[in-house]
């Protein structure tokens, strides 16, 4: 359901947001990206003459824990909204209702951390009903938790059969994912990197046959190289995944998916920023050396594949990008994505914690089409799984 089709004037919009932001030891917000991402939906409701009741989780508290109170978020939220925000010291019962039921149009309230109640994660229906009393309409704008069947993300939808909608953020996340998986402009290229094949296996299996090209980089590439008989020295490897790796290679051939693996590698004599380095063929890494980035020939090949694609999905770095000495591969791929977007009008979607960190580190986040805010949720969507938070809104 579209946000625009909700009747909002004079009504309270109960919005599930993702304010699970990092805090420092003084409990100050150190990265307000997720709060900023929620502002367009809040502003829209207020502009329509509604009031706003926000609910979120923060951290992983076991019961009530002042360390994880959403009260810590209020100053940042007030600054970003340019409004004062009322705080309810609980998310249900009289404490919450006293605040939510006295809200006037144009006012904003924030409820206390949902996870102070274990019923939230249990997806408890009674608790969801209690939460629902705080709003006349329900808006889900928390993409980061859309893969959880929690009370506030999925179960609560039942209490708003006619009055529920996606918020602006969730709608744009789904839209971006559909541009890649449902109706991509071709050629479609997926770049998958990071440490482990095992954590990306579901995505790779779902993407093969759907994408035209699959680029595999990062530490996970060595499992593929070793499975084919290459020598990978001390590089990261999951030898128990050989069968799966060979299956992926076979499936790529069967489905006509062009699969690109690194052909050369920047190796180091130790896992350290000041290690000695050299470039060697990926399947002939000397003993005692480890591959920490894709090599220069591979970078050229990957950049070329990106620059001739119309749609590009990127998840996972090409090397140990946290160390400058091994960041070039990741940075050059990031730059290629920005250029493909700007110069060829390609649609480029970046998601997953480390690729988002990498694109931010490269200062290129504003120059690609979309940077997803939901790591786990995006990965599950890319694995072809149904996300409970989305399914509940559609039913
Ligand atoms: P993931 O969480 O699976 O996406 O993996 C991200 C992590 O993989 C980052 O912290 C990278 O430093 C690490 N990584 C990427 N390439 C390599 C490599 N060749 N060797 C060791 N770690 C790597």
Image (cartoon, rainbow, N blue to C red):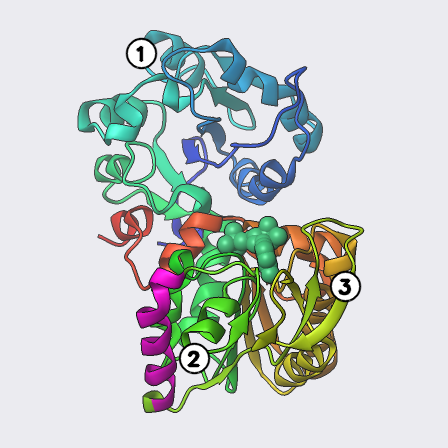
What residue is shown at x 55% (from left), y 49% (from top)?
Answer: 353
Could you tell me if the residues under marks 2 and 1 are in contact, i.e. CB atoms within 8 Å?
Answer: no
Instruction: Please tell me which residue lies in front, 313 or 277.
Output: 277
Could you tell me if the residues under marks 3 and 1 are in contact, i.e. CB atoms within 8 Å?
Answer: no
Give the magenta part as a residue range.
239-253
- On the image, which quarter does residue 31 sit in? top right
Judged by its main secondary structure, the magenta piece is helix
Instruction: Please tell me which residue lies in front, 236 or 358.
Output: 236
Question: Residue 229: in sight, yes or no?
Answer: yes
What residue is shown at x 37% (from left), y 47% (from top)?
Answer: 165
Q: Which x, y percent locates residue 372?
A: 54, 55
Q: Is residue 84 above or below residue 217?
A: above
Identify residue for label 2: 228
Q: Is residue 107 above or below residue 181?
A: above
Q: Is residue 193 above or below residue 377?
A: below
Query: Distance between the Cα atoms at labels 3 and 1?
Result: 62 Å
What residue is shown at x 31% (from left), y 42% (from top)?
Answer: 163
Q: Which x, y percent locates residue 178?
A: 43, 68
Q: Is mark 1 within 8 Å of ligand 1?
A: no
Instruction: Please tell me which residue lies in front, 290 or 325.
Output: 290
N-terminal of the pair, mark 3 or mark 1, is 1
N-terminal of the pair, mark 2 or mark 1, is 1
The circle on residue 93 is: 1
């Amino acid at each position: 359901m579209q946000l625009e089709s909700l009747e909002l004037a004079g009504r309270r919009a109960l919005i599930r947001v993702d304010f699970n932001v990092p805090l420092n030891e003084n409990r100050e917000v150190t990265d307000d990206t997720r709060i900023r991402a929620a502002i367009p939906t809040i502003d829209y409701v207020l502009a329509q003459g509604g009031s706003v009741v926000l609910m979120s989780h923060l951290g992983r508290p076991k019961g009530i824990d002042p360390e994880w109170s959403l009260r810590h978020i209020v100053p940042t939220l007030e600054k970003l909204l340019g409004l004062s925000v009322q705080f309810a010291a609980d998310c249900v019962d009289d404490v919450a209702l006293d605040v939510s039921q006295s809200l006037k149009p144009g006012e904003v309230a924030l409820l206390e951390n949902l996870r102070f109640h274990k019923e939230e994660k249990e997806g408890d229906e009674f608790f969801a009903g209690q939460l629902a009393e705080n709003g006349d309409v329900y808006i889900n704008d928390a993409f980061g938790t859309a893969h959880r069947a929690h009370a506030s993300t999925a179960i609560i939808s039942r209490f708003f059969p006619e009055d529920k909608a996606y918020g602006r953020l969730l709608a744009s996340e789904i839209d971006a994912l559909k541009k890649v998986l449902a109706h991509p402009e071709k050629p479609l290229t997926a770049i998958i990197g990071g440490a482990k094949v095992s954590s990306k296996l579901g995505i790779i299996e779902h993407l093969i046959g759907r994408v035209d090209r699959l680029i595999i980089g990062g530490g996970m590439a060595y499992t593929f190289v070793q499975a084919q008989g290459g020598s990978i020295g001390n590089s990261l490897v999951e030898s128990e995944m050989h069968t799966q790796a060979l299956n992926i290679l076979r499936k790529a051939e069967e489905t006509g998916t062009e699969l690109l693996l690194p052909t050369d590698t920047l190796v180091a004599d130790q896992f350290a920023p000041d290690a000695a380095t050299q470039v060697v063929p990926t399947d002939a890494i000397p003993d005692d050396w480890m591959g920490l980035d894709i090599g220069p020939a591979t970078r050229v090949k990957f950049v070329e594949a990106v620059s001739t694609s119309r749609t590009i999905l990127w998840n996972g770095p090409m090397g140990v990008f946290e160390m400058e000495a091994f960041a070039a591969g990741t940075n050059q791929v990031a730059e290629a994505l920005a250029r493909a977007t700007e110069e060829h009008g390609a649609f480029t979607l970046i998601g997953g914690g480390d690729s988002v960190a990498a694109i931010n580190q490269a200062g290129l986040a504003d120059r690609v089409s979309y940077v997803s805010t939901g790591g786990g949720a995006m990965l599950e969507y890319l694995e072809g799984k149904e996300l409970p938070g989305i399914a509940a809104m559609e039913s």
